[in-house]
Image (cartoon, grey):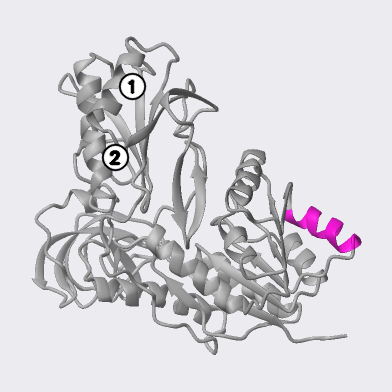
Amino acid sequence: MKKKLPVSKNEDLILTIEDLTYQGMGVAKVEGYPLFIEGALPQEKIKAHVVKVTKNYGFAKVMEFIEKSPDRVENEDKIYLQTGIAPLQNLSYPAQLKFKRKLVTDLLQKVHLDNLEVADTLGMETPYYYRNKAQVPVREVNGKLEIGFFKRNSHDFVAMEHFLIQDKRIDEILIKVRDILRMSKITAYNEEKHTGMIRHILVRRGYYSHEAMVVLVSRVRKIPNLDQIAFLIQQQCPDVKSVMLNVNPDKTNVILGKKTIKLAGKDTIQDTLNGLKFDISAQSFYQVNPQQTEKLYQLAIENAELTGKETVIDAYCGIGTISLNMAKFAKKVYGVEIVPEAIEDAKHNASLNDLDNLDFEVGEAEVWMEKWQKQGIKPDVIMVDPPRKGLTSSLIQSAVAMEPKKVVYVSCNPATLVRDIQEFMELGYQVTKSIQPVDQFPQTTHVESVTVLERTQFD
């Protein structure tokens, strides 16, 4: 017999919000049955309308706030919540920092690692206008080329001029570029028909150098008056030192295509991070919150306790941002990365900073760890900064086989961090300091952290 659910679709309920999900949705329970409610915060009493029910959980929407949370920030503009640009914008910043710490502690608790300490989240002084990179979709609205964003979980486009979490100058440049494209009668991309020209505008800006780059992402290579458009962009925005065209002819959600062509200025812009110079191209992976990245890397270096005598392996080195930071304090740094272009950038950035105590290799970290081990290289510290999917089991085993004194784990996903910590612990490594969450993306649900694991089993 089918079990009757305690709630039904289209029912109106009075609910008290108990918690927030990792996506920032309010959670209320009816006889243990969870309902997820967008825009609702813990401690709030609401009148809700149930919009969807499944066997194990349902979704509801707020019809009326009966009692509001003391942590609620009242916003005139709901657009940032609707588009998912700033899903925590309605939560006060101190409460956001607590929420991010709780994300880590809850996950540790689930696997009975609640004995591990988690420090208070390291926040920003001004938790807005921090992004040094924007990738903004371009669409036609009422016959006009517009920049904007999509509503959460949809293809509904919302025209916007201000993006709240981006460097304000980037927003200004986007509006100028939009107006130049309009004046030049350039067509916007139509996703359904796969027609039109400009799909996205990408803007990067150096936090310290103030150099900017504009990348027009187009479905086609041939765009009328392209030289004139590039000229006008640089004329109206003198800080734009590089104008590029990226061609992406595919039916895809991936923003950038494989081919990038210089239209005007330089191939790269330059910026500094902890006093080191980096050349950044259209395709470079470069951390988007420079102020917090400096803190994050300083934390990682402090936790590695480098004295100038150590050998370090950076297992996901990208364009060398962490490797170069480490190289200033270590004897030797070995970096490995699967993307060949990133390794070219890393080598270039090392020579740009006159650092010669680094070796960079293209390939999988576990493969290179085995090679380095055979060559007799013994790392004191292994640094890992993996993507959201975390570390592979084979990488953890390869790292442990090298017997470093420490593994410093920079994580952008607490769920995979907790999973990987467990495997390290099974292989004789222990977390020896408080896990330190860092808020790299204020107003969003993302949380980065630094964890130190030390070898406790010796042969």
Q: Is residue 151 visible?
A: yes
Magenta stretch in the rendered image: 365-375
Instruction: Identify the residue under disc 1.
Output: 230
> x and y percent of residue 229 in the render?
30, 19
Compared across the picture, whether 294 is left or right of 309 comes to: left
Q: Alpha-carbon distance for marks 2 and 1? A: 27 Å
Q: Tell me whether the residue at label 2 lies in contact with that at label 1, contact meaning CB atoms closer than 8 angstroms.
A: no
In this view, 264 is above or below 292: above
Q: Is residue 157 visible?
A: no
Residue in the image at 38% along x and 72% along y: 100
Residue in the image at 47% along x and 29% along y: 252
Tell me, for residue 150, which label it has, or none: 2
Where, by quadrant of the figure, is residue 35 drawn?
bottom left
In this view, 270 is above or below 390: above
Figure quadrant of the N terminus: bottom left
Task: Tell me which secondary structure the magenta stretch mostly adopts.
Answer: helix
